[in-house]
Amino acid sequence: MKTLNTTSFWRHLTTVWTVVFFAAIVYDFFTANSLEISEILLPIAVVYDAVLAVYSAEKEFKRWHDCHDTIHPGELFVIIWTVLVFGLIALSFFDHIPYHVPPEVTASYIVVVGILAITRESKELYAKMSKNGKNKCD
């Protein structure tokens, strides 16, 4: 029986929820904050943030306990988020579209940046400890 690779599962689920959330944000932009008004963005943002947190925690746990070292850079998420958010703000400014960034989007952007900061610190600490011979993976 084939075992489920949980990191792969969470990575794919994170990708799906990223696409869903980004599509919702873009839709919300072009419909004058209709999803924020209908309170649909909040549950989407909460699920996205939770899935991303679980995926990141899973990767870090495996890094520290199973010597699992895959390369899926979190910086890419931050770059995409930054382009999306600042792109919509710029578009609304230059095209005079009455749009404001919903607090759910702002909060999720902060979560993404925070997760990146934590995982980068963990990765650097892991590399430092591995180099000093204090890790079982050597």
Image: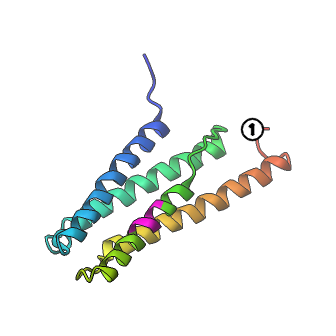
Task: Name the residue at 56% across, 58% down.
Answer: 75
Q: Indicate the position of residue 52 as horizontal and vertical percent values.
A: 43, 54
Q: Is 63 placed left or right of 18 in the picture?
A: right
According to the image, what is the colour scheme of the structure?
rainbow
Provide residue 65's location: percent of width, then percent of height.
64, 42
The residue at 19%/65% (across/down) is 40
Estimate the x, y position of residue 78 in percent, counting from the top left.
Answer: 50, 62
Q: Amino acid at mark 1?
A: Cys
Quadrant of the frame with the C terminus = top right
Principal SS element in the magenta part? helix
Q: Nearer the viewer, residue 97 or 109?
A: 97
Asked if residue 81 lies in the magenta stretch, the reply is: yes
Is residue 4 a member of the stretch shown in magenta? Answer: no
- Which quadrant holds the N terminus? top left
Across and down, in percent, residue 111 comes to 45, 67
Numbered range of the magenta stretch: 80-84
Q: Which residue is mark 1?
A: 137
Query: Which residue corresponds to the image point at 38% horizontal and 60% vertical from the top-left?
Result: 49
- The answer to whether residue 16 is above or below residue 34 is above
**Relative to 33, 70 lies left or right:** right
Residue 67 placement, left or right of 107: right
Quick one: SS at disc 1? loop
**Residue 22 picture quarter:** bottom left
Residue farthest to the front, as pictured: 95
